[in-house]
Image (spheres, rainbow, N blue to C red):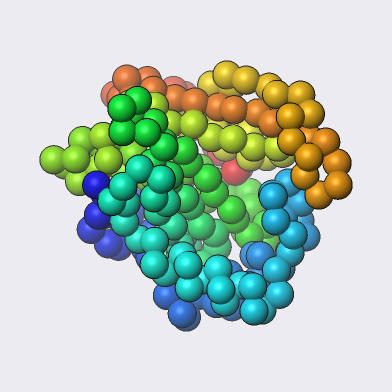
Amino acid sequence: MLKPSYPIYTARLTLRPYTLDDFDDLYAIQSDPEVTRYLYWETRDEAAVRADLQAKMGASEIREVGDRLFLAVVWREVERVVGGVTLTWLSREDGGGEIGYVFNPEFSGHGLATEATSALLRLAFTLPVDGGLGLHRVIGRLDARNTASAKVLERLGLRREAHFVENEYVKGEWTDELVYAILESEWLTRRVSPPRTRASRG
C-alpha cells in the first residue's frame, strides 16, 4: 500500500493530488496535439478533460495491485500545473511497477519531467516502513519515436531492455514500442553515487 504524505516537494516542484482548480492547466495539456502525438488517446475536449480530472482526483494512493497513482506537478516558479506523473503497481510477487509522465511542452527544456519522475521513483522504491511502495523493478514504456521521453528515462538511469517492432496498432498505424527498466539496487547505487552529467533538458 502507498499513501504518500502530501504535498511532496523537490527542488523546484510540488507533487500533489489533482483538484478541480487544475482543470485549465490539464486542458492545456490534453488538448495539445503535440502532447498526444505518441500517446494512445487523441486530444480531448472540455468534457473529456473534466471526466479524466475526476478520475485522477480519486487516485491519490495505491492499495492493491493494478492501482494507479496520479499526481499533478506544480512548478512553483510559475504556480501552474505543468505536467503529471503516474505510478502503477503491476505485481506483488515480482515487485513490479510502471512509471509514466505527461508534460506541457510550453515548459520543456527545464528538466521538470526528470525532476518530477525522480521523485516518483523514490516513492516506488522506498520501503513501506519509510512511506514507499518497496518495489523491486520499475519499467517505463513509450512509442519508439518519442525520443524526448526516452531521454528522460535514460537520465533517470533506466536502461533500454526491449524494442518491439510494430507490436501495436495505434491511431491507424503500426507502431514500435520501447521498454526501459531500473532495479531497486541500481536506483540505490545512483542515489549514493549520482553520475556526472550535463544539465538535463527533459
Question: Residue at the spot x=46%, y=38% of the render?
Answer: 98
Residue 133: where, in percent of width, then height? 27, 40
Front residue of 81 and 199: 81
Specify whether residue 68 is in view: yes
Above/below status of 52 relative to 67: below
Question: Residue at the spot x=86%, y=47% of the render?
Answer: 172
Judge left or right: residue 132 versus residue 99: left
Judge left or right: residue 184 versus residue 18: left
Front residue of 18 and 149: 18
Judge left or right: residue 110 versus residue 122: right
Specify whether residue 194 is in view: no
Residue furthest left in the image: 129
Residue 9: where, in percent of width, then height? 32, 56
Residue furthest right in the image: 172
Q: Residue 42 sits in which quadrant?
A: bottom right
Say how many tags the image has.
Answer: 0
Q: Residue 12 sits in which quadrant?
A: bottom left
Q: Residue 15 sits in which quadrant?
A: bottom left
Above/below status of 28 relative to 5: below
Residue 165: where, in percent of width, then height? 76, 24
Question: Residue at the spot x=31%, y=47% of the render?
Answer: 64
Residue 189: where, in percent of width, then height? 33, 20
Question: Residue at the spot x=42%, y=51% of the render?
Answer: 68
